[in-house]
Image (cartoon, rainbow, N blue to C red):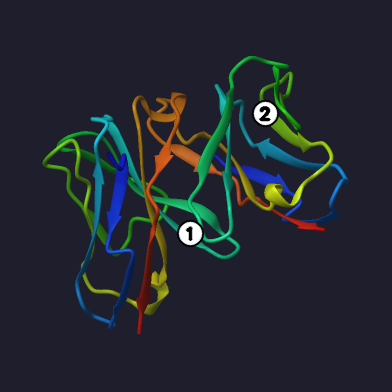
Amino acid sequence: DAGITQSPRYKITETGRQVTLMCHQTWSHSYMFWYRQDLGHGLRLIYYSAAADITDKGEVPDGYVVSRSKTENFPLTLESATRSQTSVYFCASSGSGSFDTQYFGPGTRLTVL
Amino acid sequence: GQQVMQIPQYQHVQEGEDFTTYCNSSTTLSNIQWYKQRPGGHPVFLIQLVKSGEVKKQKRLTFQFGEAKKNSSLHITATQTTDVGTYFCAGPGDNYGQNFVFGPGTRLSVLP
């Protein structure tokens, strides 16, 4: 029982390619989040979801697409990867939004060449 | 939008010295959370503060929420090498409690 998992853990791709990062949680948490982490910027929210079929933009959504057809999965797609999207991506979940503990996945290190 | 600032950005201490990081918000927060991220790891929840003036302790760590609920601090007494990492504060990113906004973090180095 891993809690929250991300795949792949490492990914190298080329500019212009589509990339999908997967996130899966086993707690049936309502809320799920995608962050990117870059040196000097901390954790920036890309998209979040309050429930299945409900998603909303965060601070830095441009160039990303999300979906949430099932409660436990929250994939993040980079439609046409750019070098500026090279980053570490963290998925997280919580039971009740910002009033509840947020649990993070191990992260995906993405390099766009 | 909601902004959360943290200082200092970096802190280098000798093992055994104390350490404090400060978190400031542009608006009043309903609650504030603290997370720790070890090098190469993912953020891990430490604590949540909700009440004005609240103080909570976890062994050598003391967390404080300001009276106006716009600032918070984390103090570590007698640092150890296991305290190395980046400490983030996080608050609600909107008025509905649906997401978070994180401070930029304070990276702590502890020299043995």
- Which residue does the numbered mark 1 point to in the structure image? A37
Q: How many marks?
A: 2
Residue at figure coordinates x 84%, y 40% from the top left: B78
Hey, what amino acid is under mark 2?
A: Lys
Where is residue A37 drawn, in percent x and y?
A: 48, 59
Q: Is residue B56 above or below residue A83?
A: above
What quarter of the picture does the N terminus of chain A occupy?
top left
- Report how far apart the C-alphas of labels 2 and 1 lie in the structure: 24 Å
The image shows residue A61, relative to residue B63, as above or below, that is: below
Q: Are marks 2 and 1 in contact (CB under 8 Å)?
A: no
**Mark 2 crowd level (few <14, some 14–19, many ≥20, 10 Å Cα):** many
Q: Nearer the viewer, mark 2 or mark 1?
A: 1
At x 45%, y 24%, the residue is A99
Q: Is residue A108 left or right of residue B57?
A: left
Which of the two residues, B50 or B35, is positioned nearer the viewer here?
Answer: B35
Residue B4, quarter of picture? top right
Q: Is any atom of residue A15 visible in this view? A: yes
Horizontal arrangement in the rendering, residue A95 relative to residue B94 (left or right):
left
Residue situated in front as seen by the camera: A54 or A94:
A94
Tell me the number on the disc at residue B70. Answer: 2
